[in-house]
Every structure is written in structure tokens, then in C-alpha cells.
Amino acid sequence: MRRWMACVLACGAACSAPAPAGNLQDEKVRARDIQDAIRDGVAYLQGAQNRDGSWGSARGTTGFDVWASVPGAHEAFRMGTTALAVMALMEAKGDAEAIRRGEEYLLREPPPRRANSMELYNVWAHGYAIQALALSYQRERQSLRRARIRTAVGQHLEALARHETAYGGWNYYDFEVGARRPASSPTSFGTAAVLVALLDARRAGLEISASMARRAAKAVMGCRKPDGSYLYDLGFRYWPHHLANCDKGSLGRTQACNVALYVWGEQVEKGDLIEGMDRLLAEHRFLELGRKRPYPHEAWYFTSGYYYYFGHYYAARALELLDPEDRRERRSRLEAAVLPFQEADGSWWDYAMYSYHRPYGAAFAVMTLLRCLDGPYRSAAR
């Protein structure tokens, strides 16, 4: 635990270092119509797809990217990014051929392996691949392809079971021991994202491990603080007042954790979803401070840029669970936190990471904005 804490604090200490020129201080926000923004985001994703059907690559480094060993870390990033892009295109009724090629990549490529004893980015890939394939399974009518989807989901579930921590749930690092069964404590937000994916898979009619989901939910619940915020990971239960674990440091994590515990029936109610979203919107400046910063955990309360669109996507998932009268005002405020920051090429991004950040940012943003609409989305697809 001490080694892990040292790594987190070392990353956070970068806030005293100068940021590269051309950072978000020069950024121009764009007045957009939400329908046009979604269509431009969809067009960006369709144009950014690789020839093999995937999205993202190890190219385009800024020199400030997260630690990512080759090839394992990048195989995980590429599959996770591809899964998010496929989900966004399916939800937005994008180009059928782009969706098919993305699905085929997810079905053809084996689940990414653990990069080394310390890096387990593959858990993100497994979770989002399961979630995307669950959506594909709901849409698919051809029996052979449905069988392929079941097989692929089963492989990702087996990989999640292998990399489950001793406490239940998942972490994407194991700095302490590097054991075959990860010895690290499960992160609240990563475990929550997998739980949401497992729920989507179960609703689609796919078989999942209920016992694994229960252990994961227990791990997330163990990270929940009395004020409704969440620890970074379960190991921080001995440092609950560390700045990263304060309510303002938890803004990007709280939404995913609340949604996961709510849908799995774990002591979180609609009132907690509302409270978590209202806190996000009221204290939003602290999440915004991390957006586009070049170092992880650089901003106040150790916020990282990559919490931004992740957090807003799960806030949109929470929005879906609210009653209509509780949804209206929050929908427009959530839209206002995402819509203006679309880039000229149609993408969104929050943390520069090789060439994955624009596709995953666009995917999260498109799926968020679709849930902010007050009417049906008018797709450009024919």
C-alpha cells in the first residue's frame, strides 16, 4: 500500500510542474445544437475507425501519456476504446458497416492479457467489451452470430474472474505484490464500470456470474463513505480523508458507483442518485479543473482529466434511472457540461493518451448527449 500511495502522490506532485504550451487556457468553447453535435461526433467516430475495425493506437504520444507497456497495455486500450465506439454508434444508429466492422474486431480478437505483473488495464477492456457485445446481442437475430457473441462474452468473463482481486472487484494496477491473483485493492470506479457492464449483459440475456457480481458490489459498497462519496480504492479505507477521497475528489467516481450499486440493489436509492448528480453539478468546477491537464492527478483533490467524460457518461446513466420530473433540469445542466467542448473535428477529449483519447471521449460524449435529449435523435444514417 505504501508503494501505491507513493506512486499516486508522485503523479499528483506534477501539479507543481509547468504545463505544456497550448493547454486548455487557449480553448474556445463552441455554441452547438445538440442534434448537430451528436451527428458530428458520430461522423468523427466513423471517420476515425482503423482498417481492422478498431479505434485508437499507440501512435501520437505527447510524452505525458499514462504508463503503458507494449504490447499488452495497448491491446487493452484499443479493445476498450473500440468497445466504447461501437456502443456509441449503435446507440446513435450510426453507419451499419462501421458498426459491423467494430463488432467483428471485438469478436475476432482474443481478450487482452495482463501486460505484466503491475499493469492490468485489460480489466477495462473486458468490461467494455462485455457491455458492447451485450448491446450487439440484443440487436442480433442471426443464431450463429449470437453464438459467437456468447462465446466472446464468456472469454471476457473468464478473464475477469482470473484477475479479480482477493477482495472482489478489480484494480488496473498491482504495485504491491504482482501476484497471479492481484493483491491490490479494488478501485471503486473501475469495479463499478464492470458492474454496470455485467448488468447490461444480464439484461440482454447473457449468462454472468452472480457471485462475482455480488463480491464486486460488496467491494464498491466498502468504498462508500457516509457523505455519499467514494474512496479511490478499498485500500484507502485507512486514509478516508486523503484529498483524493473527499467529496470533490470523488466527483468523477461517484456517478458510476451510485449507478452500479443502485442497479444491483445495494443500499443506494434514487435519492442518492439525485444527491450525487446534484453534487457533481454544484461542484463541477473541481472536475473541470482536471480536464485536459497533461499529468494524472494533477488538479485539485487529485482529479485526473480522464474522469471527465467517464463521470458524465455515468451521470447520464443515473439520469435514465430518475423519475421524469427529476430528470428535466438536470438533463440540461448535464448537457451544458459536455456540449460546448466538442473539438472542430467532431471529437471530445479530456486527457491526451496516445491516439485513444479522441475516440473514447467522443464515444462517452455521444452516449451522454443522447441521454440529454428531450426528444428523439434524428440520425444522419440512411
Image (spheres, grey):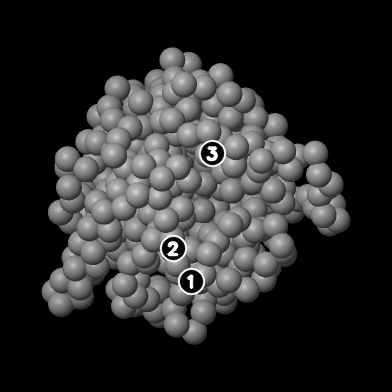
Q: Position of residue 336 (x, y in %)?
A: 64, 41
Other residues around mark 2 within 10 Å, as few (<14) / some (14–19) / many (≥20)? some
Q: Position of residue 123 (x, y in %)?
A: 38, 54
Residue occupying the point 45% across, 82% down:
52
User: Is residue 247 rendered to the left or right of residue 197?
Assistant: right
User: For residue 3, which numbered disc appears in the image?
Assistant: 3
Q: Amino acid at mark 1?
A: Pro
Q: Nearer the viewer, residue 341 or 300?
A: 300
Q: CA distance from mark 2 to mark 3?
A: 19 Å
Other residues around mark 1 within 10 Å, as few (<14) / some (14–19) / many (≥20)? some
Q: Amino acid at mark 2?
A: Ala
Residue occupying the point 20% across, 73% down:
148
Vertical position of residue 107 compared to residue 88: above or below? below
Number of residue marks: 3
Query: What quarter of the picture does the C terminus occupy?
Result: bottom left
Is disc 2 placed on a helix, strand or loop?
A: loop
User: Is residue 294 rendered to the left or right of residue 173?
Assistant: right
User: For residue 71, which numbered disc appears in the image?
Assistant: 1
| Residue farthest along the bottom direction in this orientation | 51
User: For residue 298, which numbered disc appears in the image?
Assistant: none
User: For residue 115, which numbered disc appears in the image?
Assistant: 2
Q: Sequence order check: which comes first, mark 1 or mark 3?
A: 3
Asked if the residue under mark 2 is in contact with the one under mark 1, i.e. CB atoms within 8 Å, the reply is: yes
User: Is residue 263 rendered to the left or right of residue 91?
Assistant: left
Other residues around mark 3 within 10 Å, as few (<14) / some (14–19) / many (≥20)? few
Vertical position of residue 215 compared to residue 378: above or below? above
